[in-house]
Image (cartoon, helix red, strand yellow):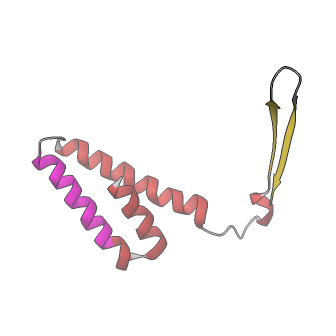
């Protein structure tokens, strides 16, 4: 979780915010190893995975999409049931 946050902060705000966040994530890794809760391989794998996921989240959800402006259009149709005699469809368009 610490390195996921660090990866997100690095992608959104750059090194001025990202490097201190990575340092705090590294401190979390070291403290987990010092308390014998994880091995080195656990923390390195978790940190790498977290960092990649944090950056991927920002890339996918927060960066503007200039190549396809209609790509954010979403359409949902969901059934709903409120007992034996009450049912129907719920439709929603997001743009």
Q: Is residue 4 above or below residue 10?
A: above
Residue at 21 percent of width and 53 percent of height = 29
The mark tally for this picture is 0
Horizontal and vertical percent position of residue 94? 79, 56
Q: Is residue 50 above or below residue 78?
A: below
Quadrant (top left/top right/bottom left/bottom right) for the C terminus: bottom right
Which SS type dominates the magenta stretch? helix
Occupied quadrant, residue 60:
bottom right
Query: Who is closer to the viewer here, 39 or 92?
Result: 92
Residue at 23 percent of width and 60 percent of height = 26
Residue at 37 percent of width and 63 percent of height = 6
Quick check: 20 left or right of 60? left
47 magenta-colored: no
* Residue segment shown in magenta: 19-35
32 magenta-colored: yes
Horizontal and vertical percent position of residue 85? 89, 22
Q: Residue furthest bottom?
A: 16
Horizontal and vertical percent position of residue 89? 87, 36
Horizontal and vertical percent position of residue 66? 71, 70
Quick check: 42 left or right of 4? left
Q: Is residue 82 above or below residue 59?
A: above
Q: Is residue 35 above or below residue 2?
A: above
Quick check: 12 left or right of 86? left
């Amino acid at each position: 979780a610490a390195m996921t946050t660090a990866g997100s902060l690095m992608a959104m705000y750059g090194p001025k915010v990202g490097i201190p966040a990575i340092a705090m994530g590294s401190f979390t890794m070291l403290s987990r190893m010092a308390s014998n809760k994880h091995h080195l391989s656990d923390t390195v794998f978790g940190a790498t995975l977290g960092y990649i996921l944090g950056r991927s989240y920002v890339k996918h959800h927060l960066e503007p999409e200039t190549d396809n402006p209609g790509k954010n259009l979403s359409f949902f149709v969901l059934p709903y049931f409120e007992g034996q005699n009450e049912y129907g469809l719920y439709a929603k368009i997001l743009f």
